[in-house]
Image (cartoon, coloured by chain):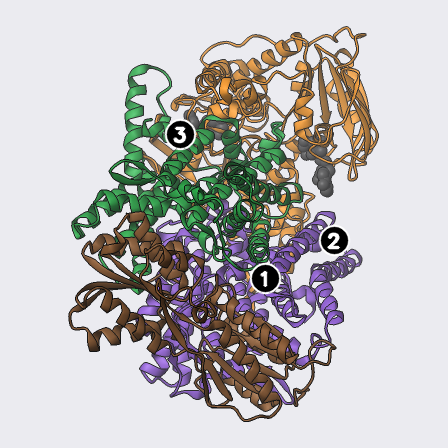
Chain colours: A orange, B brown, C purple, D green
Amino acid sequence: MSAVAATPLLELDGVSKGFPGVQALDDVRLDLRHGEVLALVGENGAGKSTLMKLLAGIHTPDAGTFRLNGRELAIEGPRHAQELGISIIHQEFNLMPDLTVAQNIFIGRERRSAGVFLDDRALNRRARDLFDHLGLALDPAEPVSRLTVARQQMVEIAKALSFDAKVLIMDEPTAALNDAEVDVLFELIDRFRSPETGVIYISHRMEELSRISDRITVLRDGRYIDTLDTAATDQREVISLMVGRELGGEQRPAPVPSGAEPVLSVRGLSTKHLLRDVGFDVHAGEILGFAGLMGAGRTEVARAIVGADRRESGVITVHGREADIRNPADAARLGIGYLSEDRKHLGVLLERSVRENVVLASLRDYVGALGFVRGGRIEATGQEYVRKLRIKTPSTGQLVRNLSGGNQQKVVIAKWLAKDCDVLIFDEPTRGIDVGAKEEIYVLLRELADQGKAVVMISSELPEVLRLANRIAVMAEGRLTAVLDNADATQEIVMDHATRFSAEGTLL
Amino acid sequence: ASDTGGETAASGGDKPYVALVSKGFQHQFWQAVKTGAEQAADEYDVEITFEGPDTEADVEQQIQMLQTALDKSPAAIGFAALDSQAAGPLLQQANDQGVPVIAFDSGVDSDIPLTTAATDNLAAAAAAAEHLADAVGHEGKVAMVVHDQTSVTGQQRRDGFVDYMDANEPGIEIVDIQYGGGDQAKSADLAKAILSANPDLKGIYGSNEGSAIGVVQAVKELGIDPATLAVVGFDSGQAQMDAIRDGLMLGAITQNPVGIGYETVKAAVEAIDGKELPETIDTGFYWYDTSNIDDDEIQAVLYE
Amino acid sequence: MSPTSLTTSENGSAAAGSALDAGPARFARLRGSLQQLLAAASLIVIVVFFSFASSHFFTANNLVSILTAATVTGILALGTTFVIITGGIDLSIGTGMVFCGVMAGVFLTYWGWPLWAGVAATVLFGALLGLINGVNVSVLGIPPFIATLGMMLIAAGLSLVISGTKPIYFNDTPEFQDIMNLSIVPGLRFPMGVAIFVVMIVAAALLLSRTIVGRYAFSIGSNEAATALSGVNVRRWKLTIYTLSGLFVGLAGVLSASRLSSAQPTGGMGLELEAIAAVVIGGTSLQGGKGSIVGTVIGALIMATLTNGLRIISVPQEWQSVAVGVVILIAVYLDMLRRRRA
Amino acid sequence: MSPTSLTTSENGSAAAGSALDAGPARFARLRGSLQQLLAAASLIVIVVFFSFASSHFFTANNLVSILTAATVTGILALGTTFVIITGGIDLSIGTGMVFCGVMAGVFLTYWGWPLWAGVAATVLFGALLGLINGVNVSVLGIPPFIATLGMMLIAAGLSLVISGTKPIYFNDTPEFQDIMNLSIVPGLRFPMGVAIFVVMIVAAALLLSRTIVGRYAFSIGSNEAATALSGVNVRRWKLTIYTLSGLFVGLAGVLSASRLSSAQPTGGMGLELEAIAAVVIGGTSLQGGKGSIVGTVIGALIMATLTNGLRIISVPQEWQSVAVGVVILIAVYLDMLRRRRA
Ligand SMILES: Nc1ncnc2c1ncn2[C@@H]1O[C@H](COP(=O)(O)OP(=O)(O)OP(=O)(O)O)[C@@H](O)[C@H]1O
Ligand SMILES: Nc1ncnc2c1ncn2[C@@H]1O[C@H](COP(=O)(O)OP(=O)(O)OP(=O)(O)O)[C@@H](O)[C@H]1O
Ligand SMILES: [Mg+2]
Ligand SMILES: [Mg+2]
């Protein structure tokens, strides 16, 4: 299906890039043919984003040549990359929260009426045309600060597609999307693909690769490993090339024999904007999965429970006692931890070290005699989790800003593993995490449950929910539509409950 | 909408209202002027307000205060100008409204004010110089800590001192003039720098209360023998009086701030009544040291 | 000019949800105007209070006095609103203004330039100071607080050096004082300076909400790195914005020297805090990314009205600053409540 | 106490790579010390320059004078470092300090309390002012700039009201002035106040780098929302940190009143900018999340040394502020280059 031309659309050769303490890329090559989707895979910290940032003109390479349609070039900066027809969707969002959707999309490309003044109406019109064309339901005049993570991702996608690009780079565009939204994205990619264009597609969701990509390039530890034809390769082969070993097979958990008192019990939870009468129990030793479409209200349930948002009504009971939770500190005192889906804004301290982030929630456990914090023990804990979660970092003193996206996510997970909570609510915990590490995190979550903790896991990846949860709660439009035992759940049944109220999904 | 003929009282009462806009408010000196003004207000049964900008550099704030005072339609205004010319339009407006203006503390460079109640700062600073010259035996190095280099009083108290030394004391060398804004801690720090840089300094002059006390503080902190260094100050305040009594300070010039305030309000009342006023009212100054500090005449013009 | 058109359309809550059809749009616009009115609520309460407290307050003359008092700080605040929206700060506006006044004296009195040339040169000189700040901040990468603090000290010192620590009077160009003081409404002392202030408000509002400078100011303050990644030349726009603030400083220098008919080489320190306070009281965030010109104007008027009113009702001076402090706290607190509910 | 131990150990670049074995660890520590030395490079250059320019500069007495001059601002800067690291600001420290001095006069002279009680009450009074700031900021949600600006004005006014605009002398407790002035080193006039400053530096450094307060200050400044979602009671810790800053303000009030043997009810305005400047020159970011006590101390010493040295070599006063401005710009620029390279 791919139109193979004599010269590749884009060709990289001998590319290297080092950061203090890290050789992120070492003699990497890659070629993108006309009209193809090339998947780029590798473990967290393998160097995928770094390679793309070189293409986008954000970093300059230490060595290597770049050829576009056979012509060698040096990319001078983001603007230059855009002018060359290279458009990128960044892994970490690069939006201006105080500007509207339309203003974000066309920033730097504003047209002026009468030479001086900006015309926001025309801008909104342009944006609406773009959304109509792409089939996205976004309001051009809405400030980005009020969008959920998934919608922000949509804005990023729309922005990248609004350029007249030849090469479209997508760095984990589906990390925040659920299946329905992924379908929309793939349709967009198919429409973009033409004999003049090509797409580099980075993802940790292996099952996507066979659907969308023509070939797969694998990186490991900053080095080029191999490029495979998707049609002639199976998933396990790719994974073993990425990880350098075989992974164990999948199994599905059985329901935990309940009967014991629930650890966390929620009744009649409502919020001003969305939630209506949500109620459920979580037992010790159990993982309760939450599924639903974008905006169904799963995140809002979690935030309302821990007191991050105001509740209109609702009773929360912890260990049989009614709890008065007004803010996340109250929740933490009662042993409830919440891992947010928005890693950058609500998860990590970007400018602080790995170890500081790891002990942030449990810092009080490290206060010794005389009230001094015990730096040695913090360092030990930091190292423990760097090892356990295989966080790729030169030291625990590294600033989190300098870690790859997936490794930042691991740091956030470590923060909650390091604190001894009875109830853990994980919102999209494996967002941006590679297949190998995902499996390890599943094992860790299961271990936590086996230790008698109650785990709530919100995920937009249905297979993940099915893989891990003992029971599955499905939400639609702010209401809880079903709580299923794992054995009774299939993708179809879950989707059926997830679309209970909406005539058509939120997207299409 | 201009209401001329300002014989109206400010706040409902039937007493005439006199607005005083001074150069300062927070400092002791101005508080003493205010006390004198209030005494006269009691005596002559008028109502007064007394306001001044936060620092003597803030001409604009003073203009604002003068504007507001005029908007209140006072019977008379007392005004100590930070810059006469800057106040020109407003003084003209006062004149147009028929509000008599009395200048105080330093002259207002305009023919609108009917009279000026002030100290002759040049002469006062010269007197300080004379006493300092006597104390150091008419030769050696002296330095000056002045409160301000741009205000008229700051300049006059500097120039009066410098001119006297130039004209009469060939043996005395002024090695440094620094400005501390009248702030005690700042003046102390800069006096210490001067003293460190000039170990053979024989005398030092502080041009107002804050500057003088700062100098005394510097002498204390450096542990300098007061017998080897003559300190001359200006204005009063308890700290300065204590320093004189303790022998840390030779003596100081005091003005008569209470008298300035009193004479200003008195002149305002006379102006309201349409009386003839002299061109200037010299409120005088005094040298005080251990020999006369407890005299009644001196005690009357000192403030704590 | 309707009140909403002075605010920036960046003000999410006012504009949101209005996109799809005309009915809600009109409603949203109405709600927007109401919002603006509420933002001015503290100011209105203050005005009403003083009007009852003293018969001298709500007179044409005194209201003009308040506007006159707000003019210089207000103009400084307008320019610095742009800088603050980018997430920066400008501490040099107070002494910078003084420096510009001195330069006006140099141009007009020392060098004998014609009035128009001296005034234009002074405004440009302000822009030059802003440009230097801009270079320090955006080219050399010095934090705005330090860059402009340095400029604040340098401007304070050079004003004294150049003027020889003496005021400079505009004896050769007596018309100079008309720029601020000339009465332009017969029968009322409505000075030209206030009219200039009004023109500058409109200009600043248009610049902020309808031009690319304003758009990029918001964008930079909202997320500087992302703005740069979007291909915007952040360095150049920051330069532009500091220079723009400098233009306002230059104009304020002209007006304040004109008002005093003299260039006073001292003072100006503390004025920057007053101007920044006006901006922040007006709801502009020091974190950047949020703000409006109407807000700044309301903030400047609140400060000027308070100061004037307290003097008019003869509150003892030592109590005045207490009262101003308390009222500012209450006004901003109420404004926060309003925003949170909105 | 080694220089590194005064800095926060989270200082990534200094500590990086030291985790795994002893050899590199020692090397990293060495590199850390070197870094600190480089941070002080500007200070050292300034000291060397003045030492050559005047023989009166590098004398024991003059160095003590510099330390004395740095004490009060330095202590204010120490406390405010915590606030700035949380991403806040405290404009009330200058007039708040004056207010505390006045309260010392009230306690000791008006009410005749014993010395220890009066001093303790003054320091606690400072903490109370800080607590009120903290409530305004973290409970009522008023932006720190406005909350502390309000307090700045209120404190300035109340100092005058309570003192009756007159200085209060400590006639009943003459020992009061020993707190700052008593010479504690025989043969050298090394005042107790400077020793107290040194003790406070050590205490602040320990608090910042080794206790939970300091850790949370960094976390809050780095990402307040994420810190709150991690179960940290951000509101309470911000309260604590503003109160802590207030304690330093109270102590500064005692020392400054002690130095002058009197409570001066005026002044204090502008001191906050000086203290904040010291903090920012020392590399603490007004954005929050970054900073160190050593940096602040170096910043305070740079300011005090510059001022002293320029006076010692008799630079005309109008040039002094120009020189200070230029040197600050250069020092911070060089420090930025150093950090970028590190
Ligand atoms: N600015 C930086 N400074 C220091 N190290 C960096 C920097 N940027 C990236 N690195 C390091 O380079 C390596 C490659 O990172 P990169 O972000 O390219 O990984 P990735 O393959 O995109 O991983 P992920 O799947 O987790 O997103 C990582 O070890 C990362 O820590
Ligand atoms: N304060 C609010 N004001 C207006 N709308 C809100 C507010 N809070 C949430 N919403 C909306 O309510 C919906 C709830 O989103 P939430 O994040 O809870 O959904 P979710 O099921 O977690 O989905 P996802 O995270 O995939 O978007 C979103 O559409 C969001 O825009
Ligand atoms: Mg990546
Ligand atoms: Mg969600």
Residue C171 placement, left or right of A328: left
Quadrant location of the C terminus of chain A? top right
Q: How many marks?
A: 3
Mark seen at residue D12: 3
| Residue D9, position as x, y percentages in the image | 41, 27
Cβ–Cβ under 8 Å for marks 1 and 3: no
Depth order, front residue of B97/A500 = B97
What amino acid type is highlighted by mark number 1? Answer: Glu
Give the number of the disc on residue C20: 2
Q: Residues within 10 Å of mark 1 (few under 14, many from 20)?
A: many
Sequence order check, earlier mark of 2 and 1: 2
Q: Nearer the viewer, mark 1 or mark 3?
A: 1
Across and down, in percent, residue A444 comes to 59, 12
Vertical order, A381 against A326 (above or below)? above
User: Which residue appears at 57% of the width and 56% of the height?
Assistant: D153
Q: Is the same chain shared between marks 2 and 1?
A: yes
Residue A157: x %, y % from top left: 58, 40
Q: Residues within 10 Å of mark 3 (few under 14, many from 20)?
A: some
Chain holding disc 2: C
Residue beneath label 1, please? C318
Which chain does the numbered disc 1 sit on? C
Measure the C-alpha gap from mark 3 to mark 2.
50 Å
At label 2, counting other C-alpha atoms closer than 10 Å, the crowd grade (few under 14, some 14-19, many 20 or more) is few
Figure quadrant of residue C153: bottom left
Relative to residue A322, is residue A331 drawn left or right? left
Q: Depth check: B90 or C12 in front?
A: B90
The residue located at (15%, 69%) in the rendering is B171
Q: Ligand 4: which quarter?
A: top right
**What's under tag 3, amino acid-wise?**
Gly
The reply to whether the residue tagged 2 has its Cβ within 8 angstroms of ligand 2 is: no
Q: Secondary structure at mark 1?
A: helix
Residue D202 percent across, percent down from the top left: 40, 31
